[in-house]
Amino acid sequence: MLVVDNDRDSVEHLQILLEARGYRVATATGVAEAMRTRDIDVVLTDVKLADGSATDLVGRFGAAPVVAMSGAARVEGDDAGFGGWLAKPVSLERLTRTLASV
């Protein structure tokens, strides 16, 4: 799994939570850094990134679904190929259910 967010603290927090649940987690703080990552089965990313957006990651990792996170009630471009989306702040229960469904 790849976790992408501008906020390094958010990335580290999600990494700790997900690794505690048995996920293998790579992290990035932007699109360019994310694109250097290999062997990804799912991408969990903030919608707005400093060097792009979640839509820039859709389809870039083969069939890996992209789950977008946003502080907005609805993600603009929800039909842009996202495998799912989560409202921030992300609850652990909702995150676990979403990842299990993609």
Image (cartoon, rainbow, N blue to C red):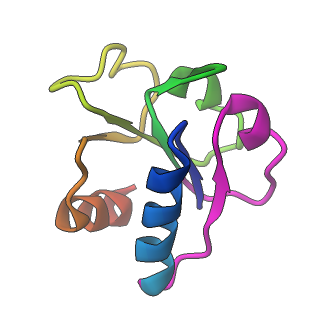
Task: Give the residue drawn at x 44%, y 85%.
Answer: 20
Percent x, y for residue 30?
A: 66, 34
The quarter of the image holding the C terminus is bottom left
Instruction: Name the outermost residue toward the top.
Output: 76
Q: How many marks?
A: 0
Residue 21, relative to residue 102: is it above or below? below
Instruction: Name the outermost residue toward the front.
Output: 9
Task: Give the residue drawn at x 61%, y 68%.
Answer: 25
Residues drawn in magenta? 21-43
The quarter of the image holding the N terminus is bottom right
Q: Which quadrant would residue 93 be assigned to in this image?
A: bottom left
Percent x, y for residue 27?
A: 65, 55
On the picture, is 15 further left or further right than 21? Answer: right
Along the viewing direction, whichever of 63 and 71 lies nearer the viewer: 71
The answer to if 36 sits in the magenta stretch is yes
Task: Give the residue drawn at x 64%, y 41%.
Answer: 29
On the picture, is 22 further left or further right than 73? Answer: right
Residue 100, relative to residue 80: is it above or below? below
Q: Taken as a whole, is the magenta stretch helix, strand or loop?
A: loop
Percent x, y for residue 94?
A: 20, 59
Task: Give the residue drawn at x 44%, y 19%.
Answer: 80
The answer to if 65 sits in the magenta stretch is no
